[in-house]
Image (cartoon, grey):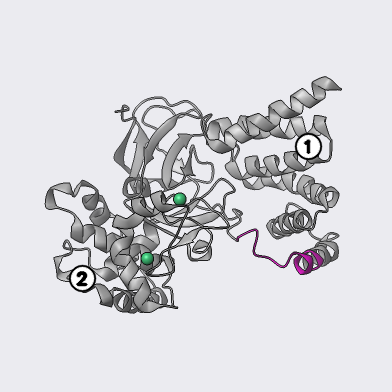
């Protein structure tokens, strides 16, 4: 067992929080855990494995519900305990598929009902999670009731005895807790492929200049320090990764999108600077479109323009900027601009060795790219 280096405490003015038990260096792993429950995000149901969350073109489909997809039999077997009861519900509701929060809460309910009393350490933390039910607006409460109706319809096939749920964890308050406390699970390309509940991580408070970052490998969450954290200092993350692209990069009509984004970029470029957040999104979109249309020179132009504002919007070091640097580096490499590519890969690597860690698949990919680049430069 690794030594525990964080603890719960009451953070002044913020309620529950987590703090460091000793000084922590940048890049150091503070905590790592599997979710209490998780599910694939609705947009990725057809393209992501329900077990390991890897994305693939040719996943096999659950023959029962025809909704769950898997890389192979092994992944399917591993996921079966979590999918077994859900499978009947999905089949029953076909072709409708409930929202992520409804599917996630159903999984939490199945898990709570199958757990023994002695195995409820995590349960307490869920029960303790704030549901914010009392201070919710009327509109939100209405939305919640609506979700709850869907949940009941969804669960109908499974005849759950909801009265056996631990006190304080009825469906409505579970839904409320999950909407406030679940995390998007993003993959290497920072696409939000799933949602998960990581009870102890919900204690982390937000800061615009956070000292920690959450990274995922599959559904495993790892919390890392991004700068030196003093002993007893509060651990914080940034809740607002507003720029993380959540759309599936492959499911777009690229030529139309490119035309639209170029027109918008052109129309606004005199009055709106690139560092405007909306312009940055357009630049990213135009870059994606150009790559898909094999116009790498133009893609690189957009990528380079976007890099500056990335630094402005994301606290440094940030995985989003590292991924952007990797994408720009790949383009430079492909176009034979080796010096530039080496520069981009070097920057991406120095960020990722802190945010992702040296063992992460993406960090290895950057390292490989960097040595390829170096080797090609050496032969010149
Ligand atoms: Zn898999
Ligand atoms: Zn199924």
Disc 1, SS:
helix
Q: Is residue 252 found inside the magenta-colored segment of the image?
A: yes
Mark 2 or mark 1: whose residue is earlier in sequence: 2
Q: Residue at x 41, y 73 (%)?
A: 98
Q: Is mark 1 within 8 Å of ligand 1?
A: no
2 over 33 or under it: above or below: above
Q: Is residue 83 left or right of residue 238?
A: left
Displayed-image quarter of ligand 2: bottom left
Label 2 belongs to which residue?
Answer: 160
Q: Which residues are magenta?
A: 248-259
252 over 315 or under it: above or below: below
Q: Quadrant of residue 283?
A: bottom right
Label 1 belongs to which residue?
Answer: 333
10 over 2 or under it: above or below: below
Residue 220 x, y percent position in the rendering? 41, 44
Residue 44 x, y percent position in the rendering? 52, 61
Q: Nearer the viewer, residue 104 or 53?
A: 53
Residue 234 x, y percent position in the rendering? 40, 37
How far apart are the two marked residues, 2 and 1, measured between alpha carbons?
56 Å
Crowding at dot 2, Cα within 10 Å, few <14 / some 14-19 / many 20+, comes out as some
Quadrant location of the N terminus in the rendered image: top left
Q: Is residue 350 visible?
A: yes
Q: Nearer the viewer, residue 167 or 137?
A: 167
Q: Which mark is residue 269?
A: none
- Residue at the farthest top position: 378
Disc 2, SS:
loop
Q: Is residue 336 found inside the magenta-colored segment of the image?
A: no
């Amino acid at each position: 067992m690794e030594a525990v280096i964080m603890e719960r405490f009451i953070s002044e003015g913020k309620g529950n929080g987590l703090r460091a038990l000793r000084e922590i260096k940048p890049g150091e792993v503070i905590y790592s855990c599997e979710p209490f429950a998780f599910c694939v995000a609705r947009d990725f149901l057809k393209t992501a494995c329900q077990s390991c969350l890897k994305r693939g073109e040719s996943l096999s489909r659950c023959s029962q519900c025809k909704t769950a997809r898997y890389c192979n039999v092994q992944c399917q077997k591993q996921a079966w305990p979590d999918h077994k009861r859900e499978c009947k519900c999905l089949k029953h509701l076909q072709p409708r598929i409930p929202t992520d929060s409804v599917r996630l809460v159903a999984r939490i309910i199945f898990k709570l009902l199958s757990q023994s009393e002695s195995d409820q350490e995590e349960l307490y933390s869920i029960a303790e999670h704030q549901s914010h039910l009392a201070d919710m607006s009327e509109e939100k409460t209405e939305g919640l009731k609506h979700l709850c109706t869907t949940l009941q319809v969804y669960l109908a096939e499974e005849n759950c005895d909801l009265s056996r749920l631990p006190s304080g964890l009825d469906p409505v308050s579970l839904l409320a807790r999950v909407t406030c406390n679940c995390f998007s699970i993003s993959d290497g390309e920072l696409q939000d492929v799933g949602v998960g509940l990581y009870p102890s991580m919900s204690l982390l408070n937000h800061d615009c200049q956070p000292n920690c970052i959450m990274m995922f490998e599959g559904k495993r969450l790892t919390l890392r320090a991004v700068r030196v954290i003093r002993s007893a200092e509060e651990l914080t993350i940034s809740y607002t990764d507003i720029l993380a692209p959540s759309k599936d990069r492959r499911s777009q009509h690229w030529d139309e999108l490119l035309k639209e984004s170029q027109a918008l970029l052109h129309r606004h470029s005199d009055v709106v600077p690139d560092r405007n957040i909306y312009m940055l999104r357009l630049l990213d979109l135009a870059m994606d479109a150009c790559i898909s249309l094999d116009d790498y020179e133009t893609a690189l132009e957009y990528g380079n323009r976007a890099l500056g504002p990335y630094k402005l919007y994301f606290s440094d070091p940030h995985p989003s900027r590292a991924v952007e640097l990797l994408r720009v580096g790949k383009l430079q490499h492909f176009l034979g601009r080796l010096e530039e590519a080496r520069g981009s890969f070097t920057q991406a690597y120095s960020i990722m060795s802190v945010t992702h860690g040296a063992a992460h698949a993406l960090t290895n990919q950057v390292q490989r790219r960097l040595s390829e680049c170096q080797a090609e430069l050496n032969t010149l």
